[in-house]
């Protein structure tokens, strides 16, 4: 038994090492056993299913929904520009941005691979303005473009001994599909955003501030926004705070990141 465990441990370590890639933007080494195209394909299926099962607020009849689309597109354009400047446009291949406001009391927002974004109406009383919404969207979209979902799925694949899929489509592999669902799993009752690692959260805060600033939104509103989120605490904190860094630790970190973010800030009329 001990020998078998040792062999399994070596195999897992070898697979992990072989599957690591360096993120062109963050510079961090990430486990990547799943192709981005497969992630985007599964995300599109899940996203479309989610929209049919929930009440989508029309941007043509709602100022709030129109705002979500407008702010989202400005963040997306900023991200595209940033990645072009870094010579990393290929990372966004296959991204077809879509922003929807969904009627739900959930204080949450999320972005799936491929740029499929949802904001819940329950979040808007906390964001209060476009700039704070931009902070949220920059944060959530960073999780997607930085490959955080792919990284977490790859980690779970190793933990479950799935390893490489050998070119088999994720959707055709029940175990892989189950892992994908555990990472995203949108539904009417449960917010999509599952707890991310501290490193991923820090990256989302960091680049989210930059993207919001590049889109013309004052990144300094992030401090007041996260303070408002923290004040919602209680026995059941918002999904966006679940297992995330402590409120004060996040705010302290954002303050340290602010000088860099402000170098990207050029106010525009909204």
Image (spheres, grey):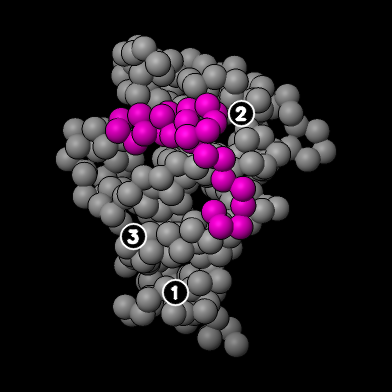
Depth check: give the residue in front, 137 or 227.
137
Q: Is residue 76 left or right of residue 67?
A: left
Quarter holding the N terminus is: bottom right
- Residue annotated with mark 3: 36
- The stretch of residues the image draws in magenta is 51-78
Question: Disc 3 vs disc 1: which is toward the camera?
Answer: 1
**Of helix, strand and loop, which mostly describes the magenta segment?**
helix
**Mark found first going from the N terminus, 3 or 2:** 3
- Residue annotated with mark 2: 124
The residue sitting at 28% across, 48% down in the picture is: 92
Question: Disc 1 vs disc 2: which is toward the camera?
Answer: 2
Q: Where is residue 101, by image quadrant?
A: top right
The residue sitting at 34% across, 13% down in the picture is: 268
- Residue 251: x and y in percent read 57, 23
Q: Is residue 76 magenta?
A: yes
The residue sitting at 50% across, 42% down in the picture is: 100
The residue sitting at 36% across, 45% down in the picture is: 97
**Mark found first going from the N terminus, 3 or 1:** 3
Q: Secondary structure at mark 1?
A: helix
């Amino acid at each position: 038994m001990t020998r078998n465990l040792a062999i399994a441990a070596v195999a897992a370590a070898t697979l992990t090492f072989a599957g690591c890639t360096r993120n062109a933007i963050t510079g961090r080494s990430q486990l990547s056993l799943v192709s981005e195209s497969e992630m985007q394909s599964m995300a599109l299926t899940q996203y479309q299913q989610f929209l049919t099962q929930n009440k989508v607020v029309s941007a043509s009849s709602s100022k709030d929904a129109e705002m979500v689309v407008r702010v989202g597109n400005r963040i997306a354009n900023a991200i595209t520009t940033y990645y072009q400047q870094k010579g990393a446009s290929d990372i966004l291949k296959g991204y077809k941005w879509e922003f929807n406001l969904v009627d739900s009391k959930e204080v949450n927002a999320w972005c799936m691979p491929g740029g499929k974004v949802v904001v819940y109406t329950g979040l808007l009383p906390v964001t209060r303005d476009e700039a704070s919404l931009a902070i949220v969207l920059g944060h959530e979209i960073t999780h997607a473009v930085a490959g955080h979902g792919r990284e977490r799925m790859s980690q779970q694949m190793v933990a479950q001994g799935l390893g490489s899929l050998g070119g088999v489509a994720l959707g055709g592999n029940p175990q892989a599909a189950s892992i994908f669902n555990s990472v995203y799993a949108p539904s009417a009752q449960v917010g999509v955003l599952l707890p991310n690692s501290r490193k991923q959260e820090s990256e989302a805060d960091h680049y989210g501030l930059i993207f919001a600033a590049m889109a013309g939104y004052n990144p300094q509103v992030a401090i007041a926004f996260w303070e408002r989120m923290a004040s919602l605490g209680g026995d059941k904190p918002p999904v966006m705070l679940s297992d995330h860094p402590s409120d004060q630790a996040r705010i302290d970190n954002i303050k340290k990141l602010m000088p860099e973010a402000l170098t990207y800030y050029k106010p525009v009329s909204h």
